[in-house]
Amino acid sequence: MKLRTYVPTLPPRTPYISEAEVFSRTLTAIRTLKAMPDRERRFLASGTKAAWPATLVEWSDLLAQAEQTPDDVEPREKINPKRSEISDALVAGEWFAKLALLPENIEEFEQCIEAYRTGMAKTPQVRDQKIVTLYSQGWSLKLIGQRFGWNENQCERRLFEIARNLWRIGNKTARYADLYRIQKLSRERVSA
């Protein structure tokens, strides 16, 4: 008697994106998004100041310049991103954003969000996101390491771990923190 066995057939899976490609696309996405005009600049350029008196426009521009510290002034790359670069920047930008939702970064993410909300921080990015951002802007591993109190080898190892996490995120194999539980705990802390 011949036994029959059931062999499940799985649908074909799309091939994995390589780790180098995911990391490269993420760095390119950061540079592309950095080169695009700010939302505030687009808003102001759309004519919202058109009805203002000329002196008020001048005063608002002078006030904005005075409030900018030298550290805030960053040279912008003079590129006009193509549509394909912008659409890829949205995909890779999502991978970059999901770095904060990994279990090892979620507590820091909550602290960064609170600091950003209260005005204590300029950005709600976690350390891993800051490292990738600085690396995409051309900072050396030595300078990034000095900023976070590491040597060059420690910084390189951390960057490799971040690249591996981005690879997992890009290929949809990453595990994220339980956001529902975290939001519930946050509401309990606020109401207490």
Image (tube, helix red, strand yellow):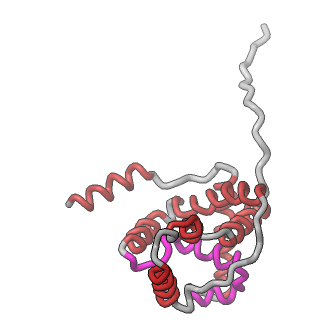
Range covered by the magenta-colored residues = 119-147
Which residue is farthest left? 192
Q: Is residue 23 magenta?
A: no
164 or 97, nearer to the observer: 97
Q: Is residue 145 magenta?
A: yes
Instruction: Give x and y (percent) for residue 88.
Output: 73, 56
Q: Residue at x 33, y 52 (%)?
A: 184
Which quarter shows the N terminus? top right
The quarter of the picture where residue 154 lies is bottom right
Image-based side of 73 in relation to 11, left or right: left
Instruction: Give x and y (percent) for residue 58.
Output: 50, 84
- Residue 181 versus residue 161 in the image, above or below: above
Instruction: Give x and y (percent) for residue 182.
Output: 38, 55
52 or 35, nearer to the observer: 52
- Residue 147 versus residue 50 in the image, above or below: below
Q: Residue at x 73, y 18 (%)?
A: 5
Instruction: Give x and y (percent) for residue 93.
Output: 64, 60
Which quarter shows the C terminus? bottom left
Q: Residue at x 52, y 87 (%)?
A: 65
